[in-house]
Amino acid sequence: MNRDLLAYAVLALVLAAAPMLGAYPIFVMKVMCYALFACAFNLLLGYTGILSFGHAAFFGLAGYATGQALKVWGLPTELGVLFAVGVSAFAGLIMGGLAIRRSGIYATMITLALAQMLYFFFLQAPFTGGEDGLQSIPRGSLLGGLISLRTDINLYYFVLGLFMVGVLIIWRTVHSPFGQVLQAIRENEPRATSLGYDVNRFKLLAFVLSAALSGLAGSAKSLVFVSATLSDAMWQMSGTVVLMTLIGGVGTLSGPILGAFIVVLLENKVGELGTYLSLVTGVEWFNRMGQSVTIVIGFIFVVCVMAFRRGIVGEFFHFFNKKKASA
């Protein structure tokens, strides 16, 4: 546990110093938003054993809720973020209440179906802007106007605070008696039931908490890019967060963070790399491949599944524990 806290402190210091070390704040903020989203999803999949293929609904819903609260209602930024988290938690209560009635692939398909229903609602609802999305969301300010979030550096540290709070909540949940029950349900649900635990109640609580933290990530992203779009609520986004978690390592605290960093880095740099190689070598194929980011990410996913069955972080810990046991 002390090692976890030390790693948590080191991560906070590295991220706090990142802008001063030349990192582009918008890129790092995007990584933090997706990393928190992946960690929230991992709480449900890695520690409870429930595969949701509709988590993009909470991520996108929070973005629209934040935009509505800040742009239309004129609420302070803090209240706008809290409102978005509350709306996502309520949506998680409804979706989770229906999904936990089934198990396995049936529960997964229920989450996908409900998320698609919400997506088509966003597509047609007048307040979402349809295919254009909700644009020009004001970032606002903190503490009654004392700290303006219009500058990227101020917003960066606000998003960093949200990210660290979200990760700390997940860490505390995993290491609490509640988290131990969730892992027991994941390993052997009938045995957990026989021990007297209300399994459905624990599943629903985990679903709501995961949805709320996903909403926190979606709300932060809408502030970073001052917009909420349909792409955040599409089923592809649900697939992306699954990909991040599997690449980094399911059931690990740091795995989803690493997976999010890898995926976001590829999305931003593969195109540039392809263009550069095409100019240097004169081979147009590199440029076409660079434009097909999903193909490259898919290839890396296949490699990770074949070579790192437990994910990158999961395989590292497995190798470390194996060496430690044999020593």
Image (tube, rainbow, N blue to C red):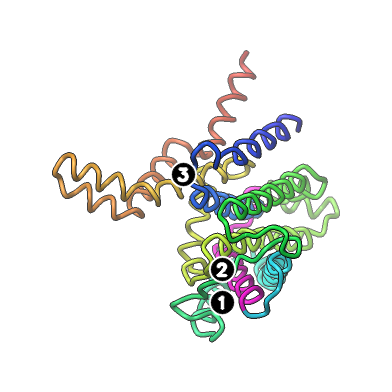
The mark that comes first in sequence, 1 or 2, is 2
Residue at point 57% right, 57% down?
A: 151
Sequence-first tag of 1 and 3? 1
Vertical position of residue 27 compared to residue 113: above or below: above
Q: Nearer the viewer, residue 99 or 157?
A: 157
**Three-letter amino acid code of the residue under disc 1:** Leu
Quadrant where the image shows the N terminus: top right
Mark 2 — residue?
60
* Disc 1, SS: helix
Whole-Å distance between the Cαs marked 1 and 3?
A: 29 Å
- For the residues marked 1 and 2, what is the alpha-carbon distance in whole angstroms? 9 Å
Q: Main secondary structure of the magenta part?
A: helix
> Which residue shows up at 61% across the image and 58% down it?
217
Q: Considering the image in quadrants, where does the C terminus appear?
A: top right
Q: Which residues are magenta?
A: 45-71
- Outermost residue on the right side: it is 196
**Would residue 104 be seen by someone viewing this image from the given angle?**
no
Per the image, the residue denoted by label 3 is 262
Q: Which mark is residue 118?
A: 1
Q: Nearer the viewer, mark 1 or mark 3?
A: 3
Instruction: Confirm whether residue 36 shows in the render.
Output: yes
